[in-house]
């Protein structure tokens, strides 16, 4: 049984706590937060089933704790993860992994030197729809990928520790990274604006991966909520709409076919407009799946798809995009 402590019970921590408590293969042992009011809130749900502390050092010093889940502000990830790794504990950390590549690389090295597991919660990688899309691509149903078009917009929640790109676009970057087996862009372009927050609250990110393109829109200033990804392939196309409760994924048999025709030079292009198919999807919670993958990684000592390497690839893109925003 893995004894795990949750550090942070603010915005996202309660969701992590809920799924840790639901997974009975974990021994959910401690909730740590520096604010007493948050711990009091947690006690109303978990009572005496877990212990509570205001001091992170209590978690670090507790030798019975095998793993730590960090659900705190991004600026605290590096320091807390470093302490946990040095104490010999495996680490689950919310996205983004760290503020910068340098910190991420140091934590990766530290984990390797100490034989520890780092699992970054790029939660969308563990969503059943993304799992299905991965299967479709692996079977060649979409053909070669031409481009991704991603839109992640809503009204709020405004943040000052990270930009909307680091908060929302990181999801789409992790999806693209996973679906393309870690492809890295050769060109990164970005524009954005700061409104009502210290960092960008609206960003438009364009990526050229050499053999496919990606366009990622992120905004905290939208009157509507949209979580949509369009993937165009040479054989088929699909739309994943996470806001649509009934039809989250539709696969379209649409595109263009090359028709050999002696009358023309080499071939002609003919539009193909077939049916849209709604596949049957597995019903599971992405956060639960992510935490379960962390548990499996601890047991097998095999890193997950969202390990430090994957997180570093994504942070490299975000850092390049930040430089574009500064121009």
Image (cartoon, helix red, strand yellow):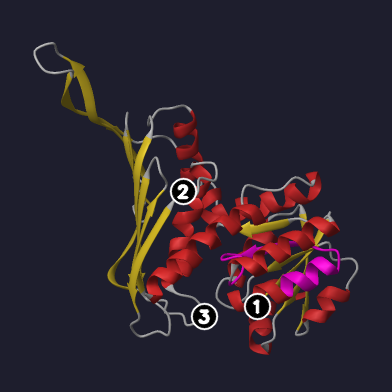
Instruction: Measure the C-alpha gap from mark 1 to mark 2.
Output: 26 Å
Instruction: Find the magenta span and give its range.
Output: 80-99
Q: Is residue 235 above or below residue 56?
A: above
Q: Position of residue 324 (x, y in %)?
A: 39, 69
Alpha-carbon neighbours of circle 2 within 10 Å: few (<14), some, or many (≥20)? many
Instruction: Measure the C-alpha gap from mark 2 to mark 3.
Output: 24 Å
The label on residue 176 is: 2
Residue at point 66% right, 73% down? 77
Proximity of marks 2 and 3: CB atoms separated by less than 8 Å: no
Please tell me whether mark 2 sits on a helix, a strand or a loop: helix
Proximity of marks 3 and 1: CB atoms separated by less than 8 Å: no
The residue that disc 3 covers is 161
Q: Quadrant of residue 16?
A: bottom right
**Quarter that holds the C terminus:** bottom left
Q: Is residue 138 left or right of residue 99?
A: left
Q: Quadrant of residue 28?
A: bottom right
Q: Position of residue 300 (x, y in %)?
A: 79, 44
């Amino acid at each position: 049984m893995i004894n795990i402590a949750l550090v942070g019970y603010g915005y996202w921590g309660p969701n992590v706590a809920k799924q840790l408590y639901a997974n009975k293969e974990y021994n959910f042992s401690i909730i740590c937060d520096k604010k007493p009011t948050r711990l009091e809130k947690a006690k109303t749900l978990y009572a005496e089933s877990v212990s509570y502390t205001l001091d992170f050092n209590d978690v670090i010093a507790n030798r019975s704790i095998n793993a730590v889940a960090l659900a705190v502000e991004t600026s605290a990830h590096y320091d807390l993860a470093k302490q946990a790794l040095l104490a010999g504990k495996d680490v689950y950390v919310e996205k983004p992994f760290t503020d910068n590549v340098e910190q991420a690389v140091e934590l990766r090295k530290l984990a390797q030197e100490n034989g520890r597991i780092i699992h970054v919660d790029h939660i969308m990688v563990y969503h059943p729809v993304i799992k299905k899309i991965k299967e479709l691509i692996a079977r060649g149903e979409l053909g070669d990928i031409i481009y991704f078009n991603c839109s992640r917009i809503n009204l709020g929640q405004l943040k000052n520790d990270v930009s909307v790109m680091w908060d929302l676009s990181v999801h789409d970057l992790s999806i693209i990274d996973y679906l393309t087996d870690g492809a890295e862009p050769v060109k990164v372009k970005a524009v954005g604006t700061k409104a009502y927050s210290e960092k960008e609250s609206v960003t438009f990110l364009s990526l050229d991966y050499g053999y496919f393109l990606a366009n990622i829109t992120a905004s905290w200033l939208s009157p509507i909520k949209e979580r949509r990804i369009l993937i165009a392939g040479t054989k088929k196309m699909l739309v994943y709409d996470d806001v649509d409760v009934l039809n989250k994924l539709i696969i379209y048999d649409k595109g263009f076919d090359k028709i050999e025709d002696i009358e023309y030079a080499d071939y002609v292009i003919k539009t193909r407009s077939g049916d849209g198919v709604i596949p049957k999807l597995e019903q599971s919670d992405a956060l639960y799946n992510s935490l379960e993958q962390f548990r499996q990684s601890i047991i097998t000592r095999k890193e997950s798809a969202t390990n430090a390497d994957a997180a570093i690839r994504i942070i490299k893109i975000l850092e390049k995009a930040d430089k574009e925003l500064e121009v």
